[in-house]
Amino acid sequence: MNRLITIVGAPSNIGIRPYDDGSPRRLDLAPGVLRAQGIAARLAARDFGDVEPPPYRDFERSGLRPRNEEGVTAYSRALAGRVATAAGGGSFVLVLGGDCSVVLGCMLGVRRPGGHPVGLAYIDAHADFASPEESRSGSAASMCLALAVGRGDTPLAHLADGGPLARPEDVVLVGRRDQAEPWYGHDALRASPILDLPGVTLRENGPAGGARVILERLARPGVDGFWIHVDADVLDPSVVPAVDSPTPGGLEVEELVELLTPLVGHPGALGMELTIYDPALDPQGTSAARLVSLLERVIAGA
């Protein structure tokens, strides 16, 4: 890759509900564990450190608001400031999460004042398109794609000067396999202009074909670059089991590399974030090693 790469850590677990025993999920450990694999040196990247979140508070959900709504809102703005700084000079920003609500801060950070809207390639095993009222968990992580396009009566849906972070027509949802879980907002997704490429469609067209379709949507006039969200659960659990919602039938490492490489290598790519890797579920570090190797291959190929 012929661009400078800048790493930002987003060690947040405030956007996802606790374990059933009430203890917070340890997604906050992910940036440190991935750094311990030597990711900065292997990518020849600068490291802009971590943006620390406020503590998890909503252990019991209150009403139909997103859990930790105030904290996630404040954290999204703080993360946006660090991402904006990291993106200076045209650097490609790699954000190490954390739960997937960090996509909101990433999108806010790469928006250019007075520029066109930014696109979003949302690569995930789940649609994450529930409204706060529909979400079973109340976690921002279950609704963060919906929030990014302004769906929901919450400040999280209006982070960009009172409006949404992205237009639905500038979003591609890739790789979901949550057909048996309609509470992720499937009815609203079908009615939306979002381009939906479920895992079965991606397999039919192949990862390279999927990348071409994504770029046709996002690398067009009127879109001011695009952000890439990668949730580790898009990979099959046999490959990376250390995620909080493992779902069979996911991508192999080779397939995800083939999908991501042309996206990351495109001049319109502003950055990418990796989320939902949970080191507490990875005592031997196998998943961490595979994820860092995957990122290294994608960056080298791009």
Image (tube, rainbow, N blue to C red):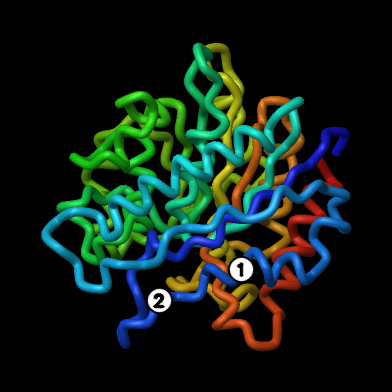
Indicate which disc, 2 or 1, sits on the residue closer to the N terminus.
2
Which quarter of the rendering shows the C terminus? top right
Distance, label 2 to label 1, CA atoms, is: 14 Å
Residue at image point 73% right, 60% down: 254
**Left or right of residue 271, residue 144 in this image:** left
The percent coordinates of residue 274 (x first, y second) are: 60, 55
The answer to whether 205 appears left or right of 178 in the picture is right
Residue 95 position, x and y percent, is 63, 50
Considering depth in this image, is 249 or 128 the residue closer to the camera?
128
Which residue is at a point 47% across and 58% down the rendered structure image? 53
Q: Which residue is pictured at 67% across the width and 68% down the height?
A: 32
Left or right: 61, with 272 as reference point: left
Which quarter of the rendered picture does the N terminus lie within?
top right
| Residue 149 image position (x, y, % from top left) | 35, 34
Judged from the image, the secondary structure of the residue bearing numbered disc 2 is loop
Q: Is residue 192 visible?
A: yes
Return the residue found at the far left. 63
Mark 1 Cα within 10 Å, few/some/many (few <14, many 20+)? Answer: many
Q: How many marks?
A: 2
Name the amino acid, label 2: Pro
Q: Residue 50's x, y, as percent? A: 63, 55
Q: Decide which of 194, 130 is in the foreground and name it.
A: 130
Identify residue for label 1: 30
Mark 2, residue position: 24
Amino acid type of the residue that numbered disc 1 sits on in the rendered structure = Ala
The foreground one among 271 and 237 is 271
**SS for dot 1:** helix
Q: Is residue 51 above or below residue 265?
A: below
